[in-house]
């Protein structure tokens, strides 16, 4: 999935939880965006800088047992206010459809190697890889379009298009209350 898609699905999930379950009301959408991208930021940085001997862009930060479950458990057990960010971090595995890469997802249970999708040890190779995914994976474009639809829904339902609401969203990391939400309070 492309970066905007990771953010869109995490934001959409958060907004649904806020509206339907009345939880995570004070979550910061800016931090949710970073958390949803954190696995790629970490793994791709390791590869591009040469700090990883593995040349694929999905290594340690895409593993279930070394990375995602500990983050989720730590949030549940120790810092509940971090739970929306842990969920956004974990949503990355779902939106990347990591079940297609069991050597990475369940590392080290299938051996010491990670799934070897493509060489990504330069920015040029990463761009080529994303182009390949867009060309060859039939689900990528519909999923990315779903992400765009989620962003449109968020910005229309939150009335972000009005006045200084967009700048307020960027400054505070929260959607401004709409008139129906203000009446509920």
Image: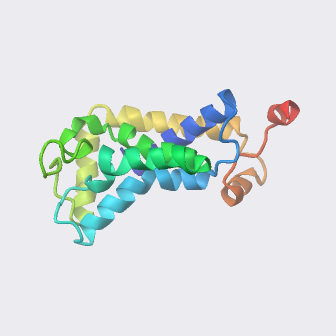
Picture layout, residue 98 above or below residue 126: above
Image coordinates for residue 35, horizontal then vertical, percent: 49, 53
Identify which residue is drawn at 53% across, 34% down.
Answer: 149
Q: Quadrant of the C terminus?
A: top right
Horizontally, residue 9 falls left or right of residue 119, namely right
Identify which residue is drawn at 70% across, 32% down.
Answer: 22
Identify which residue is drawn at 63% across, 38% down.
Answer: 154
Q: Is residue 175 visible?
A: yes
Picture layout, residue 30 above or below residue 176: below
Horizontally, residue 126 falls left or right of residue 77, namely left
Image coordinates for residue 74, horizontal then vertical, percent: 48, 49
| Residue at the far top in the pictured view | 20
Q: Nearer the viewer, residue 69 or 50?
A: 69
Identify which residue is drawn at 25% across, 54% down.
Answer: 59
Q: Across the whole image, how many numbered discs are drawn on residues? A: 0
Image coordinates for residue 6, horizontal then vertical, percent: 44, 45
Q: Nearer the viewer, residue 1 or 84?
A: 84
Q: Is residue 88 visible?
A: no
Image coordinates for residue 81, horizontal then vertical, percent: 62, 49
Picture layout, residue 133 above or below residue 185: below
| Residue at the far front in the pictured view | 77
């Amino acid at each position: 999935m492309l970066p905007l898609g990771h953010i869109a699905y995490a934001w959409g999930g958060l907004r649904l939880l806020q509206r339907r379950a009345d939880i995570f009301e004070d979550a910061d959408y800016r931090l949710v965006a970073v958390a949803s991208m954190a696995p790629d930021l970490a793994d791709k940085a390791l590869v591009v800088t040469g700090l990883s001997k593995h040349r694929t862009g999905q290594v340690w930060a895409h593993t279930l047992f070394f990375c995602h479950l500990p983050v989720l458990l730590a949030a549940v057990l120790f810092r509940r206010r971090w739970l929306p960010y842990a969920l956004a971090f974990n949503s990355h595995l779902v939106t990347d459809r990591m079940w297609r890469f069991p050597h990475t997802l369940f590392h080290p249970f299938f051996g010491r190697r990670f799934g070897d999708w493509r060489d990504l040890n330069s920015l040029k190779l990463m761009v080529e890889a994303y182009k390949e995914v867009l060309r060859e994976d039939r689900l990528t474009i519909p999923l990315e379009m779903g992400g765009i639809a989620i962003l449109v829904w968020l910005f229309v339902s939150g009335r972000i298009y009005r006045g200084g609401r967009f700048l307020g969203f960027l400054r505070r990391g929260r959607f401004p209350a709409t008139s129906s939400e203000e009446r509920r309070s």
